Image (cartoon, rainbow, N blue to C red):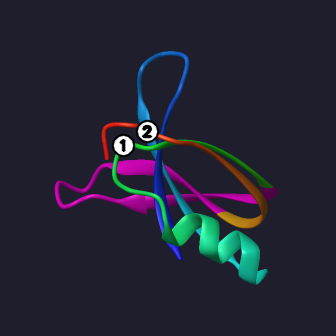
Amino acid sequence: MAKVRATTADGETLFVNVIAFDSDVRASLHHLRDGDALAVAGSLVPKVWTDKQGNTRPALDMVAHRVIAVADTDH
């Protein structure tokens, strides 16, 4: 399981909870570090969660079928 931060066109950050069942996809996610760029293909389910201040926030749950990671040479 992974948590991905995605930025919307208006600059809002959304959290995408990603789960994968394929071992190659899991391995790709496992090797990523905070800040790595990636593209994920899969099924997406929109959700809403409430923060500590009582504000509702959007979130997404995804079952990843494929991951493409952009290697960061700084690691």
Give the labeled residue for mark 2. 72
SS category of the residue bearing label 1: loop
47 falls in the magenta region:
yes
| Tally of numbered tags | 2
The quarter holding residue 62 reads bottom right
Dots 1, 2 in contact, CB < 8 A: yes
Task: Please give the range of residues in magenta.
Answer: 42-61
Q: Which residue is mark 1?
A: 35
Q: Amino acid at mark 1?
A: Gly
Image location of residue 31, percent across then percent down? 49, 66
**Residue 18, label in figure:** none
Crowd rating for badge 1 (residues with CA inside 10 Å; few <14, some 14–19, many 20+): few
Task: Specify few, some or many for label 2: CA neighbours under 10 Å numbering under 14, 14-19, or 20 or more.
Answer: few
Instruction: Indicate the amino acid at tag 2.
Output: Asp
First along the sequence among labels 1 and 2: 1
User: Marks 1/2: CA distance?
Assistant: 9 Å
